[in-house]
Image (spheres, rainbow, N blue to C red):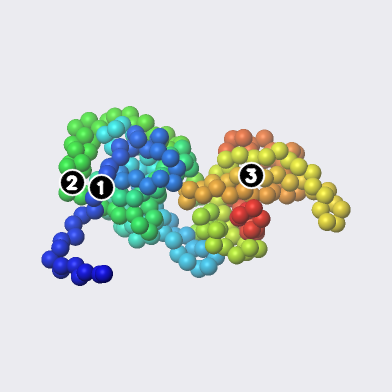
Amino acid sequence: HVSPVSSSIHVGDPKYDFKPLAGIESTDPNAYVDIIALVKDFAPSRNIVTKQGKELNKRELTLADDSGCQIQATIWGDKASMPPSTWESQPIVAFRGAKVSDWNGRSLSTGAGTVMKINPDLPDAKKIRRWWDFGGQSTTLRSLSTNPDGTPAINDDVGGMNTADFVPLSSLEEAAPNSVVDVIGIVRSASEEQKITNRQGKEVMKRTVAVVDDSGVQVNVAIWGERAGRESSMATRWSECPVIALKGARVSDYDGRT
Protein backbone atom coordinates (compact mmCIF):
# COMPACT_ATOMS: atom_id res chain seq x y z
CA HIS A 1 0.00 0.00 0.00
CA VAL A 2 1.40 3.41 -1.00
CA SER A 3 0.24 6.45 0.95
CA PRO A 4 0.53 9.99 -0.42
CA VAL A 5 3.05 12.25 1.31
CA SER A 6 1.82 15.56 2.63
CA SER A 7 3.11 18.49 0.57
CA SER A 8 3.61 20.43 3.80
CA ILE A 9 6.64 18.34 4.75
CA HIS A 10 9.82 20.45 4.64
CA VAL A 11 12.97 18.85 3.25
CA GLY A 12 15.85 20.53 5.05
CA ASP A 13 19.61 20.29 4.82
CA PRO A 14 21.15 16.81 4.79
CA LYS A 15 22.00 15.22 8.11
CA TYR A 16 25.73 14.99 8.68
CA ASP A 17 27.93 12.76 10.79
CA PHE A 18 31.16 14.72 10.51
CA LYS A 19 34.48 12.95 10.90
CA PRO A 20 37.58 15.04 11.72
CA LEU A 21 40.28 14.88 9.06
CA ALA A 22 42.62 13.23 11.56
CA GLY A 23 40.20 10.30 11.59
CA ILE A 24 40.51 9.74 7.82
CA GLU A 25 43.97 8.23 8.30
CA SER A 26 42.48 5.15 9.98
CA THR A 27 39.38 4.99 7.74
CA ASP A 28 39.22 2.11 5.27
CA PRO A 29 39.68 2.95 1.57
CA ASN A 30 36.40 3.16 -0.40
CA ALA A 31 34.46 4.15 2.72
CA TYR A 32 32.15 7.16 2.51
CA VAL A 33 32.44 9.91 5.10
CA ASP A 34 30.97 13.30 5.97
CA ILE A 35 33.58 15.98 6.53
CA ILE A 36 33.66 19.71 7.09
CA ALA A 37 36.83 21.69 6.57
CA LEU A 38 38.36 24.92 5.32
CA VAL A 39 39.61 25.16 1.73
CA LYS A 40 43.24 26.07 2.37
CA ASP A 41 44.27 25.98 -1.28
CA PHE A 42 42.98 24.93 -4.69
CA ALA A 43 44.34 23.99 -8.10
CA PRO A 44 43.07 25.14 -11.50
CA SER A 45 40.25 23.05 -12.93
CA ARG A 46 41.15 20.56 -15.64
CA ASN A 47 38.98 19.55 -18.56
CA ILE A 48 39.55 15.89 -19.42
CA VAL A 49 38.13 14.49 -22.65
CA THR A 50 37.73 10.71 -22.81
CA LYS A 51 38.09 8.67 -25.97
CA GLN A 52 34.29 8.43 -26.00
CA GLY A 53 34.15 12.22 -26.30
CA LYS A 54 32.82 12.75 -22.77
CA GLU A 55 34.14 15.80 -20.95
CA LEU A 56 35.06 15.48 -17.29
CA ASN A 57 35.96 18.48 -15.16
CA LYS A 58 38.07 18.02 -12.06
CA ARG A 59 39.69 20.24 -9.46
CA GLU A 60 41.98 19.51 -6.53
CA LEU A 61 41.32 21.14 -3.15
CA THR A 62 43.51 21.15 -0.07
CA LEU A 63 41.27 20.90 2.99
CA ALA A 64 42.24 21.66 6.61
CA ASP A 65 40.42 21.44 9.93
CA ASP A 66 40.98 21.94 13.64
CA SER A 67 42.17 18.37 14.15
CA GLY A 68 45.50 19.71 12.86
CA CYS A 69 45.47 17.87 9.53
CA GLN A 70 45.11 18.64 5.86
CA ILE A 71 44.11 16.37 2.98
CA GLN A 72 43.79 16.47 -0.79
CA ALA A 73 40.24 16.24 -2.16
CA THR A 74 39.23 15.85 -5.82
CA ILE A 75 35.92 17.33 -6.91
CA TRP A 76 34.34 16.44 -10.25
CA GLY A 77 31.76 17.75 -12.70
CA ASP A 78 29.76 20.86 -11.87
CA LYS A 79 31.47 21.12 -8.50
CA ALA A 80 34.84 21.46 -10.25
CA SER A 81 33.47 24.00 -12.75
CA MET A 82 32.73 26.64 -10.14
CA PRO A 83 34.78 29.82 -10.77
CA PRO A 84 38.09 30.33 -8.91
CA SER A 85 36.47 33.17 -6.93
CA THR A 86 34.46 30.47 -5.12
CA TRP A 87 37.63 29.20 -3.48
CA GLU A 88 39.80 32.32 -3.22
CA SER A 89 38.17 33.40 0.05
CA GLN A 90 39.09 30.05 1.66
CA PRO A 91 35.48 29.03 2.37
CA ILE A 92 34.30 26.32 4.71
CA VAL A 93 32.99 23.34 2.76
CA ALA A 94 30.89 20.41 3.97
CA PHE A 95 30.76 17.10 2.11
CA ARG A 96 28.20 14.39 2.71
CA GLY A 97 29.30 11.08 1.23
CA ALA A 98 32.88 11.82 0.15
CA LYS A 99 34.85 8.72 -0.81
CA VAL A 100 38.09 7.84 0.96
CA SER A 101 41.00 6.66 -1.18
CA ASP A 102 44.46 5.37 -0.26
CA TRP A 103 45.93 6.98 -3.36
CA ASN A 104 48.61 9.51 -2.49
CA GLY A 105 48.52 8.47 1.18
CA ARG A 106 44.93 9.31 2.05
CA SER A 107 42.70 11.47 -0.14
CA LEU A 108 39.03 12.21 -0.77
CA SER A 109 36.90 12.46 -3.89
CA THR A 110 33.34 13.35 -4.74
CA GLY A 111 30.89 11.24 -6.71
CA ALA A 112 27.44 11.59 -8.22
CA GLY A 113 25.86 11.08 -4.79
CA THR A 114 28.11 13.48 -2.87
CA VAL A 115 26.41 16.57 -1.45
CA MET A 116 28.65 19.64 -1.20
CA LYS A 117 27.74 22.79 0.73
CA ILE A 118 29.89 25.91 0.75
CA ASN A 119 29.87 28.05 3.90
CA PRO A 120 26.98 26.12 5.47
CA ASP A 121 25.18 27.71 8.40
CA LEU A 122 26.34 25.08 10.87
CA PRO A 123 28.01 25.29 14.30
CA ASP A 124 30.91 23.14 13.02
CA ALA A 125 31.55 25.62 10.21
CA LYS A 126 31.71 28.54 12.64
CA LYS A 127 34.02 26.57 14.93
CA ILE A 128 36.49 25.83 12.12
CA ARG A 129 36.39 29.45 10.93
CA ARG A 130 37.22 30.68 14.44
CA TRP A 131 40.06 28.16 14.69
CA TRP A 132 41.52 29.32 11.38
CA ASP A 133 41.18 33.03 12.07
CA PHE A 134 42.60 32.84 15.60
CA GLY A 135 45.79 30.85 15.08
CA GLY A 136 44.95 27.89 12.84
CA GLN A 137 46.38 29.46 9.70
CA SER A 138 49.80 29.78 11.35
CA THR A 139 49.78 26.18 12.60
CA THR A 140 51.96 23.52 10.99
CA LEU A 141 49.43 21.00 9.70
CA ARG A 142 50.07 17.29 9.27
CA SER A 143 49.37 16.22 5.70
CA LEU A 144 47.47 12.98 5.16
CA SER A 145 48.34 13.11 1.46
CA THR A 146 51.79 12.36 0.10
CA ASN A 147 52.89 15.87 -0.81
CA PRO A 148 53.77 17.99 2.23
CA ASP A 149 51.52 20.83 1.08
CA GLY A 150 48.63 18.60 0.00
CA THR A 151 48.87 19.72 -3.63
CA PRO A 152 48.24 17.30 -6.51
CA ALA A 153 51.00 14.72 -6.96
CA ILE A 154 50.74 14.68 -10.74
CA ASN A 155 52.06 17.72 -12.60
CA ASP A 156 49.95 18.94 -15.51
CA ASP A 157 53.09 19.71 -17.53
CA VAL A 158 54.26 16.26 -18.64
CA GLY A 159 56.94 16.68 -21.26
CA GLY A 160 54.77 18.94 -23.37
CA MET A 161 51.99 16.34 -23.70
CA ASN A 162 48.42 17.52 -24.00
CA THR A 163 47.09 16.39 -20.63
CA ALA A 164 43.50 16.94 -21.77
CA ASP A 165 43.88 13.63 -23.66
CA PHE A 166 44.58 11.62 -20.52
CA VAL A 167 41.65 9.59 -19.21
CA PRO A 168 41.20 8.61 -15.53
CA LEU A 169 42.01 4.99 -14.79
CA SER A 170 38.51 4.59 -13.37
CA SER A 171 37.12 5.03 -16.91
CA LEU A 172 38.99 1.96 -18.21
CA GLU A 173 36.37 -0.33 -16.70
CA GLU A 174 33.97 0.88 -19.38
CA ALA A 175 36.55 1.01 -22.20
CA ALA A 176 36.23 -1.59 -24.94
CA PRO A 177 39.00 -4.23 -25.12
CA ASN A 178 41.69 -3.30 -27.68
CA SER A 179 40.76 0.38 -27.54
CA VAL A 180 43.69 2.79 -27.30
CA VAL A 181 43.93 5.34 -24.48
CA ASP A 182 46.34 7.89 -23.00
CA VAL A 183 46.81 7.57 -19.22
CA ILE A 184 49.00 9.05 -16.53
CA GLY A 185 49.62 7.88 -12.98
CA ILE A 186 52.12 6.97 -10.30
CA VAL A 187 53.96 3.64 -10.34
CA ARG A 188 53.08 1.95 -7.04
CA SER A 189 55.10 -1.24 -7.66
CA ALA A 190 56.97 -3.03 -10.44
CA SER A 191 57.74 -6.69 -11.06
CA GLU A 192 61.13 -8.04 -12.05
CA GLU A 193 61.71 -8.28 -15.79
CA GLN A 194 60.70 -11.59 -17.40
CA LYS A 195 61.88 -13.22 -20.59
CA ILE A 196 58.85 -14.35 -22.62
CA THR A 197 58.82 -16.43 -25.80
CA ASN A 198 56.07 -15.18 -28.12
CA ARG A 199 54.09 -17.19 -30.65
CA GLN A 200 56.68 -16.51 -33.32
CA GLY A 201 59.35 -18.09 -31.14
CA LYS A 202 61.04 -14.77 -30.43
CA GLU A 203 62.20 -13.91 -26.92
CA VAL A 204 60.98 -10.54 -25.60
CA MET A 205 61.29 -8.81 -22.24
CA LYS A 206 58.23 -8.01 -20.14
CA ARG A 207 57.71 -6.08 -16.91
CA THR A 208 54.39 -5.44 -15.12
CA VAL A 209 53.91 -2.20 -13.20
CA ALA A 210 50.95 -1.26 -10.97
CA VAL A 211 49.83 2.29 -11.74
CA VAL A 212 47.41 4.43 -9.69
CA ASP A 213 45.92 7.86 -10.32
CA ASP A 214 43.73 10.37 -8.49
CA SER A 215 40.52 8.61 -9.51
CA GLY A 216 41.51 6.11 -6.80
CA VAL A 217 41.90 3.15 -9.19
CA GLN A 218 44.93 0.90 -9.74
CA VAL A 219 45.63 -1.03 -12.96
CA ASN A 220 48.44 -3.31 -14.08
CA VAL A 221 50.40 -2.16 -17.11
CA ALA A 222 52.50 -4.61 -19.13
CA ILE A 223 55.64 -3.03 -20.58
CA TRP A 224 57.41 -4.90 -23.37
CA GLY A 225 60.74 -4.93 -25.17
CA GLU A 226 63.70 -2.70 -24.40
CA ARG A 227 61.69 -0.52 -22.01
CA ALA A 228 61.14 -3.53 -19.75
CA GLY A 229 64.79 -4.62 -19.66
CA ARG A 230 67.31 -3.90 -16.94
CA GLU A 231 69.35 -1.80 -19.39
CA SER A 232 66.46 0.62 -19.81
CA SER A 233 66.89 4.14 -18.40
CA MET A 234 63.84 3.41 -16.21
CA ALA A 235 65.21 0.17 -14.75
CA THR A 236 66.62 1.79 -11.61
CA ARG A 237 63.70 4.18 -11.13
CA TRP A 238 60.71 1.87 -10.62
CA SER A 239 61.30 1.72 -6.86
CA GLU A 240 61.15 5.55 -6.73
CA CYS A 241 57.41 5.52 -7.60
CA PRO A 242 57.81 7.78 -10.65
CA VAL A 243 54.99 9.44 -12.55
CA ILE A 244 54.46 7.60 -15.82
CA ALA A 245 52.58 8.87 -18.87
CA LEU A 246 51.49 6.39 -21.54
CA LYS A 247 50.40 7.55 -24.97
CA GLY A 248 48.52 5.01 -27.05
CA ALA A 249 48.23 2.24 -24.42
CA ARG A 250 46.02 -0.65 -25.50
CA VAL A 251 43.24 -1.81 -23.13
CA SER A 252 43.03 -5.54 -22.41
CA ASP A 253 40.38 -7.53 -20.58
CA TYR A 254 42.96 -10.04 -19.37
CA ASP A 255 42.62 -10.41 -15.58
CA GLY A 256 40.01 -7.64 -15.34
CA ARG A 257 41.33 -4.49 -17.02
CA THR A 258 45.02 -4.01 -17.88
Apparent side of residue 16 relative to residue 203 in the rendered image (left or right): left
User: In terms of sequence position, does the residue under pointer 3 or pointer 2 come before the other?
Assistant: 2
Apparent side of residue 202 relative to residue 184 in the rendered image (left or right): right
Q: Quadrant of residue 237?
A: top right
- Dot 3 alpha-carbon crowd within 10 angstroms: few under 14, some 14 to 19, many 20 or more: some
Q: Residue at x 57, y 40 (%)?
A: 188
Q: Residue at x 27, y 30 (%)?
A: 138
State the separation of the CA atoms marked 2 and 1: 10 Å
Amino acid under disc 2 = Leu
Residue at the disc numbered 1: 16
Q: Is label 2 in a helix, a strand or a loop?
A: loop
- Dot 1 alpha-carbon crowd within 10 angstroms: few under 14, some 14 to 19, many 20 or more: some
Task: Where is residue 76? Give x, y as percent.
Answer: 39, 56
Q: Is label 3 in a helix, a strand or a loop?
A: strand
Residue at the disc numbered 2: 122
Q: Do we see residue 43 in this rendering?
A: no
Task: Where is residue 41? Give x, y as percent.
Answer: 33, 43
Residue at the disc numbered 3: 209
**Pair 2/1: label in front:** 1
